[in-house]
Image: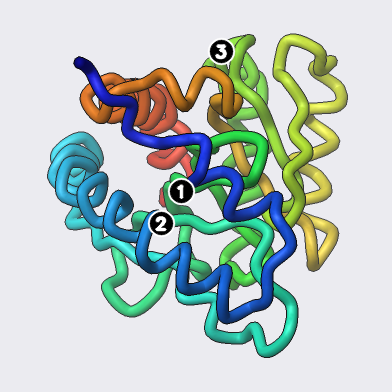
């Protein structure tokens, strides 16, 4: 019998009341081993597609002292010491869905220059992003906007905000709702991740010019 890779219980880690210690133990025991397996598949893929060496960074949630994390992730970036300062790729889960994203988050010191590159290519970027992809402007919230429901002007405003607002972010990719995610085998999920990142590589290359 074919086994789905993520199970209902993986998502329940984030929807049941838990202490920080209990939830972190579940993340470390149930989720992070899967991240490590995904990392083995994705790192060589990204390194080949982007012609750069990528490293994996599994979220440690080290700053948390009281509240349990509401999501968890692995990020892929070209610095082996960290990812937050760089354009990077993310894979992770909230209690409601998986996410497969390319992102520039507020810690990036080059956020303004990236936004300038995006501004120069904004029409191209808008066309490049498939309609079934989503955008997010805050990686700490599960809310996303489907590109098909976004006007071109709103997309442009998001780029301008990335330049002007210190805490602004830009993330783009797909979400896989829990009901679908728990039907996917490891091979099917890896295929979806690679397919999504392959579509996002041109955005990544524009961001690092």
Image location of residue 195, percent across then percent down: 33, 21
Q: Is residue 1 left or right of residue 22?
A: left
- In this view, the residue in front, 195 or 67, is 67
Q: On screen, 99 above or below 80?
A: above
Please tell me whether mark 2 sits on a helix, a strand or a loop: strand
Q: Earlier in the sequence, mark 3 or mark 2?
A: 2
Residue at the outermost bottom position: 65
Image location of residue 137, percent across then percent down: 75, 46
Please tell me whether mark 3 sits on a helix, a strand or a loop: loop
Per the rendering, the mark at residue 90 is 1
How many numbered circles are shown? 3
Q: Based on the displayed image, in which of its 4 quarters is residue 3 positioned?
A: top left
Circles 1 and 2 in contact, beta carbons < 8 Å: yes
Which residue is denoted by mark 2 in the rendering? Answer: 74
Q: Earlier in the sequence, mark 1 or mark 2?
A: 2
Per the rendering, the mark at residue 130 is 3
């Amino acid at each position: 019998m074919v086994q789905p890779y993520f199970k209902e219980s993986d998502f329940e880690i984030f929807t049941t009341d838990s202490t920080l210690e209990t939830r972190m133990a579940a993340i470390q025991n149930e989720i992070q081993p899967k991240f490590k397996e995904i990392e083995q598949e994705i790192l060589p893929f990204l390194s080949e597609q982007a012609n750069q060496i990528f490293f994996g960074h599994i979220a440690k949630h080290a700053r948390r002292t009281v509240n349990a994390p509401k999501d968890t992730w692995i990020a892929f970036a070209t610095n082996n010491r960290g990812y937050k300062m760089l354009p990077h790729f993310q894979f992770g889960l909230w209690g409601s869905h998986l996410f497969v994203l390319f992102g520039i988050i507020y810690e990036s010191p080059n956020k303004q220059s990236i936004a300038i590159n995006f501004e120069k290519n904004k029409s191209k970027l808008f066309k490049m992003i498939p309609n079934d992809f989503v955008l997010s402007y805050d990686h700490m919230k599960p809310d996303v906007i489907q590109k098909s429901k976004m006007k071109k002007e709103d997309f442009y405003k998001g780029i301008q905000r990335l330049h002007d607002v210190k805490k602004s972010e830009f993330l783009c990719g797909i979400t896989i709702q829990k009901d679908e995610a728990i039907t996917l085998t490891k091979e099917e999920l890896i295929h979806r991740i690679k397919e999504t990142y392959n579509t996002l590589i041109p955005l990544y290359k524009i961001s690092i010019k």
